[in-house]
Amino acid sequence: MQAAEASIRPISLPPSGKCLAGRSAALRRLWIAGLSTAHRALHPIPARYLCNAKKTLNRFSDLVRKLILAGTGPAGGEGISAVAGVANVDLLRGFFTGQDPKQFLFFTRTPNGIEAGKAFLQWLSERPGHRDKAITLRAYVAQLQALNASGKKAPADLSYIHQPVLVFNGDSDRMVPTRNSLDLAHRLPNSTLVIYPDAGHGGVFQFHTRFVSQALEFLAR
């Protein structure tokens, strides 16, 4: 977000509803505020929430110009319903080894991945203020339940999304297996796929310099 401020006006929308349609009120507020195109805003929209996107994207097509999706895949993707097991195992690994679970969840266990995870965690600790609150047990369970339900659904038809979409992931994502990002890009008719080597779910954190450059170039087209 900080890097984007140099060329666009970033606006982060909090998650709401089970589908993208649940964000229509937030998009409407952007329209009322006079933001004519969403290339001036960054919307964190998990791909699993694209299930009812057609109505919203058609209604606010003048606001949504481009989408950027990272570390995600379509509903019903292989391994999505198993995220709870992966996350809980890594929580235990972190507890018994005295390490932050993010080291296991977001990064590979290769020397490069381990060092990238340490650098990411160090960077997080340096932020002086405006820090996210620790996730509550209730929110954690609700998130895993939503992922489990999403993994059991049939993939949505995404062929109607004609806006340019940039899809990112690492080549060894354990939380949302990388093959789901490939499937997602295949289902989107106007997509570009970027896969980072020796990277997991936190690929955009590990390759943050490259990610920011590629994202800004995509938004500037």
Image: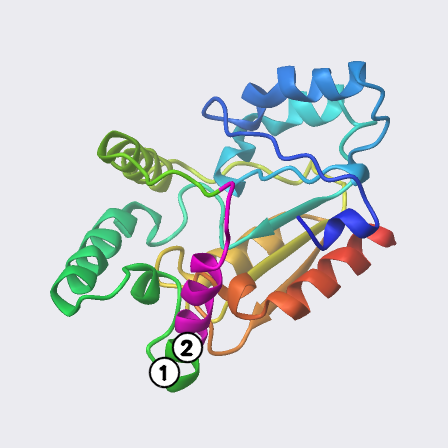
Q: How many labels, in total?
A: 2
Residue 113: which numbered mark, if any?
Answer: 2
Label 1: which secondary element: loop
Residue visible at 76% across and 40% down?
162
How packed mark 2 is, by other alpha carbons closer than 10 Å (few <14, some 14-19, many 20 or more), is many
Q: Is residue 19 left or right of residue 78?
A: right
Magenta extent: 116-130
Q: Is residue 190 visible?
A: no
Check residue 206 for magenta coloring.
no
Tell me the kind of residue under disc 1. Answer: Thr
Distance, label 1 to label 2, CA atoms, is: 5 Å
Q: Position of residue 51 (x, y in %)?
A: 53, 31
Residue at the disc numbered 1: 110
Label 2: which secondary element: helix
How packed mark 1 is, by other alpha carbons closer than 10 Å (few <14, some 14-19, many 20 or more), is few
User: Marks 2 and 1: in contact by CB < 8 Å?
Assistant: yes
Q: Main secondary structure of the magenta part?
A: helix
Which corner quadrant of the image does residue 138 belong to?
top left
Q: Position of residue 95 (x, y in %)?
A: 15, 60
Check residue 117 for magenta coloring.
yes
Tell me the kind of residue under disc 2. Answer: Gly
Which corner quadrant of the image does residue 161 belong to?
top right
**Residue 100 higher or lower than 140, as above or below:** below
Residue visible at 50% across and 54% down?
127
